[in-house]
Each structure stands twice: as C-alpha cells, then as structure tokens.
Image (cartoon, rainbow, N blue to C red):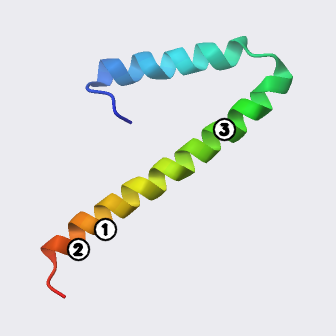
Amino acid sequence: MNAGSDEERAAINQELKDLYASLPEEEKTVFNEQLQKFLVTEMARVKSDYESINGFNNPN
C-alpha cells in the first residue's frame, strides 16, 4: 500500500507470497486472520482520511 513504485509493490507481494508458502499449514490460518484484520483496519483508516479530505472540499 505504501510502495513507491510498481517494482517495489511487486517485490513486497513476492516476499509475502514466499513467506506464506514457507509457513506450516496451521500457521497459514493465523497469518490469514492477521492479514485480514490489518487490511480491514487500513481500509477503514484510508476511508476516514478520504472522507476528512473530501469534506474540506464540500461546503456544509
């Protein structure tokens, strides 16, 4: 999400894929749950930031 370029994003994605592939099956469930929590939290933050900025451009 904070990658500075497409190449950096691809490298991060590959690193995550490699990490996931190296995990034992029982740890993949925990990894997926933690990743899901992270993504939900970050999406909520981005939405809140967007709404805050967007609100400045629209008169009340």
Amino acid type at circle 3 is Gln
Q: Residue at x 37, y 63 (%)?
A: 48
Total numbered labels placed on residues in the image: 3
SS category of the residue bearing label 3: helix
Contact between labelled residues 1 and 2, with CB atoms less than 8 Å apart: yes
Give the residue furthest to the right.
26
- Comes first in the chain, label 3 or label 1: 3
Amino acid type at circle 2 is Gly
Q: Where's residue 23, x and y in %?
A: 74, 16
* Residue identifier under label 2: 55
Contact between labelled residues 2 and 3, with CB atoms less than 8 Å apart: no
When asked about the image quadrant of residue 30, the answer is: top right
SS category of the residue bearing label 1: helix
Q: Residue at x 47, y 58 (%)?
A: 44
Q: Residues within 10 Å of mark 2 (few under 14, many from 20)?
A: few
Q: Residue at x 31, y 68 (%)?
A: 51
Q: Is residue 32 left or right of residue 29?
A: left
Q: Residues within 10 Å of mark 1 (few under 14, many from 20)?
A: few
* Residue identifier under label 1: 51
- Is 13 placed above or below 56 here? above
Q: CA distance from mark 2 to mark 1?
A: 6 Å
Give the residue furthest to the bottom.
60
- Comes first in the chain, label 3 or label 2: 3
Q: Residues within 10 Å of mark 3 (few under 14, many from 20)?
A: few
* Residue identifier under label 3: 34
SS category of the residue bearing label 2: helix
Q: Residue at x 52, y 51 (%)?
A: 41
Q: CA distance from mark 3 to mark 2?
A: 32 Å
Q: Quadrant of the N terminus?
A: top left
- Is 30 placed above or below 5 here? below
Dot label at residue 19: none
Q: Is residue 7 left or right of residue 32?
A: left
